[in-house]
Amino acid sequence: MYKKAIYHEDDNFTLTVELVDDVPFIHLALYKASKSILDNVSKKWAEVKALAYFDGYEAIYTYTKDERMFKLFNPTKVLGDYEYNGEKYKVAEWALN
């Protein structure tokens, strides 16, 4: 099963949720940065984590070429590298329990 939906989108950032074989992946595209924008990103990030938890998921993941998201949201662990179509990505996990 595959689903992809935009959870939040505005001129500052987009937060997308992707379900791949019932595994939730979260993606952030940040277009502008300021304290108030990052506060809003953090609020939306917390909402997505809470929704995933209450939907019964034990963790959420991301794969990205830009590891700055890891500095903002401190993953539980970085799972390693993943290569797809010749592009390298880092994969990280956030435990929800």
Image (spheres, rainbow, N blue to C red):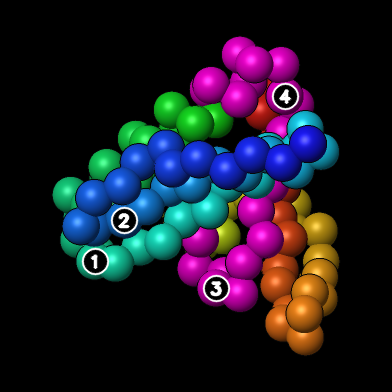
Q: Are marks 2 and 1 in contact (CB under 8 Å)?
A: yes
- The residue closer to the viewer here, 31 or 78, is 31
Instruction: Measure the alpha-carbon separation of dots 1 and 4.
Output: 30 Å
The quadrant of the picture occupied by the N terminus is top right
Is residue 68 toward the left or the right of residue 53 in the image? left
The residue shown at (20%, 57%) is: 11
Which amino acid type corresponds to the residue marked 4 in the rendered image? Answer: Tyr
**Amino acid type indicated by mark 2:** Phe
- Check contact, mark 3 vs mark 2: CB within 8 A: no
Residue 57 tag number: 4
How far apart, in angstroms, are the residues tagged by discs 3 and 1?
15 Å
How far is mark 4 from mark 2, CA to CA? 25 Å
Q: Amino acid type of disc 1?
A: Lys
Q: Secondary structure at mark 4?
A: loop
Q: Is residue 56 magenta?
A: yes
Q: Which mark is residue 13?
A: 2
The single residue placed furthest to the bottom in the displayed view is 86
Kindly indicate whether the residue at mark 1 contacts the one at mark 3 (C-beta within 8 angstroms).
no
* Residue at position x 75%, y 26% in the image: 58
Vertical placement of residue 11 versus 17, above or below: below
When asked about the image quadrant of residue 97, the answer is top right
Measured Cα–Cα span from mark 3 to mark 4:
25 Å
Q: Which residue is mark 3?
A: 66
Q: Which of the two labelled residues, at mark 1 and mark 4, occupies the earlier sequence position?
A: 1
Magenta residues (range): 50-69
